Image (tube, rainbow, N blue to C red):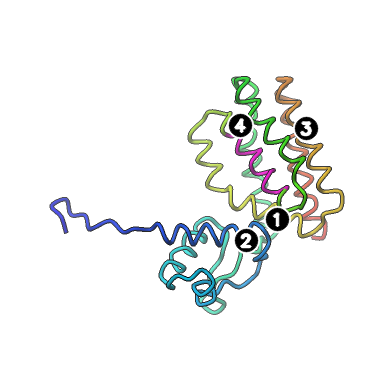
Amino acid sequence: MTETGLGPARRRGLSTEVADAIREAIFDGRYAPGAALREVELSEALRVSRGPVREALQKLEREGLVHTEWHRGTTVTALSLQDVAELDSLRAALESLAVRRVVDQASEEDLASIEKTAAAMDRAETPHEMVRCDIAFHDAVYAAANHSRLASAWEAIRSQVHLFLITRVNVSTDGYLEQIRQEHRDLVAALRLGNVDGALRLFAEHRRHAFDVLTSGS
C-alpha cells in the first residue's frame, strides 16, 4: 500500500479483449438471446484462463448483455416485454433531445457524417450487418448533438439497444433490409430540412416499427 492508501493498479487489458470478443459473438448472432455462456468453454475457445473470462462476463453484465443466476449460470440476456418497453421509452427520451440539438446546431460536417453512416447501409447484406449500421447511424446522431452527458447516457444503453434490434430481427426479417435503408434515408433528409417536428415524427416512427415487431405477439 502506498502513502495515498491506494493499492497497485490491475491490468485489465486481457479481460477487456475477452469482453470485446464475447460481445462481438453476441452481436453477430453466434450467441443468441438465452444462450449459455460457460466459463470453461469460453476460456478454452479464447485460450485464456478463467479469470479474464469471469471479469469479462461481469463487464458484459453491467452493460446488460448477459445475466447471471446462481442456478443457471450466465446466459445472453433475453429481453422481457418490460425490458423492451423500458428501452423504447428511454431511447425515445434521449433521442428527442439529440434530434432537437442536431436540427438546431449541427454543422455541415456533422450532417455529412450522419449521411455517410446511412449510405453505408447500402452495403449491408445481412440483418446483423444492418443492425450494426443502424447503431452506427445513431452513434453519429448523438455525436452531432454535441452534448457529452447525453452521449454518456446513450453509451450506457447502447449495447442493450443493439440487443433490442438483434431480438427484433430474430422475430422477422421480411423486407427488413430495404425498409431500414429507406427509413434512414428519410431520417437524414428530415435532419437536413431542419424541421424539428418532422424529424421527431420520423424518428418516432422508426422506433415504433421495431417496437411493434417485438410486441406484436404479446
| Tag 1–tag 3 contact (CB < 8 Å) | no
Extent of the magenta region: 130-142
Q: Earlier in the sequence, mark 3 or mark 4?
A: 4
Q: What is the three-letter code of the residue carrying label 4?
A: Ala
Q: What is the three-letter code of the residue carrying label 1?
A: Ile
- Residue annotated with mark 1: 166
Residue 97 location in percent, x, y?
60, 31
Q: What is the three-letter code of the residue carrying label 2?
A: Ile
Q: Whole-Å distance between the Cαs marked 3 and 2?
A: 27 Å
Q: Secondary structure at mark 2?
A: helix
Q: Earlier in the sequence, mark 3 or mark 2?
A: 2
Against 62, residue 118 (above or below) is above
Residue, x 56% and y 66% (percent of image)?
67
Q: Whole-Å distance between the Cαs marked 1 and 4?
A: 23 Å
| Tag 2–tag 1 contact (CB < 8 Å) | yes
- Residue annotated with mark 2: 26
Quadrant hosting residue 32: bottom right
Q: Secondary structure at mark 3?
A: helix
Q: Secondary structure at mark 1?
A: helix
Q: Earlier in the sequence, mark 1 or mark 3?
A: 1
Q: Residue furthest bottom?
A: 71
Residue 19 location in percent, x, y?
50, 60
Q: What is the three-letter code of the residue carrying label 3?
A: Arg
Q: Secondary structure at mark 4?
A: helix
Residue, x 63% and y 26% (percent of image)?
100
Q: Whole-Å distance between the Cαs marked 1 and 3?
A: 21 Å
- Residue annotated with mark 3: 185
- Residue annotated with mark 4: 98
Q: Whole-Å distance between the Cαs marked 2 and 1?
A: 9 Å
